[in-house]
Amino acid sequence: MIDYEDIISKARITLEENRPDEALKILNNQPVEKRSEVLFLKGEIYFKLQRWGEALNQFTLFLEQSPSDKRAESYCLMIQNILGFYHKDLFNP
């Protein structure tokens, strides 16, 4: 039997050790279910890797299961601000 908590714990520790690629491999190589903590952790990993679209997707899926989570809402807002950033002087030499 697969211990989901052990897989999630290993991925979280790997992420805290600043190895997000390895943490993502841990989660992707195991048949983890669409559990809310897995979605949130994948969102954090993609955020750290600056893969904004994938991070936003994971946090949005997480919010469908836990609609009142302030951390996920904050992440979504930060990502939307990053993606929506426009500086007119950067495009007007």
Image (spheres, rainbow, N blue to C red):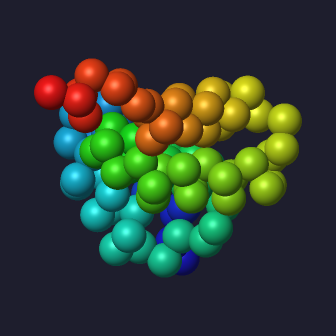
Q: In the picture shown, does residue 15 fall above or below 89?
A: below
In the rendered structure, the answer to whether residue 60 lies left or right of residue 52 reads: right
Q: Nearer the viewer, residue 63 or 76?
A: 76
Instruction: Looking at this view, name the residue that lies furthest to the left.
Output: 93
- Indicate the position of residue 53 as horizontal and vertical percent values: 45, 55
Q: Residue at x 74, y 48 (%)?
A: 63
- Indicate the position of residue 85 as horizontal and vertical percent values: 43, 31
Quarter of the image where the N terminus is located? bottom right
Q: In the picture shown, does residue 17 fall above or below 40?
A: above
Q: Nearer the viewer, residue 13 or 74?
A: 74
In the rendered structure, the answer to whether residue 36 lies left or right of residue 57 reads: right
Q: Residue at x 29, y 63 (%)?
A: 25
Q: How many marks?
A: 0
Instruction: Looking at this view, name the residue that lies furthest to the right.
Output: 68
- Indicate the position of residue 46 as horizontal and vertical percent values: 38, 49
Q: Nearer the viewer, residue 81 or 52?
A: 81
Picture quarter containing residue 73?
A: top right
Q: Residue at x 32, y 31 (%)?
A: 16
In the rendered structure, the answer to whether residue 16 lies left or right of residue 85 reads: left
Question: Is residue 5 visible from the viewing direction of this image?
Answer: no
Q: In the picture shown, does residue 19 fall above or below 73?
A: below
Quarter of the image where the C terminus is located? top left
- Indicate the position of residue 37 as horizontal and vertical percent values: 61, 49
Q: Residue at x 79, y 56 (%)?
A: 64
Question: Is residue 51 visible from the viewing direction of this image?
Answer: yes
Q: In the picture shown, does residue 67 fall above or below 91?
A: below
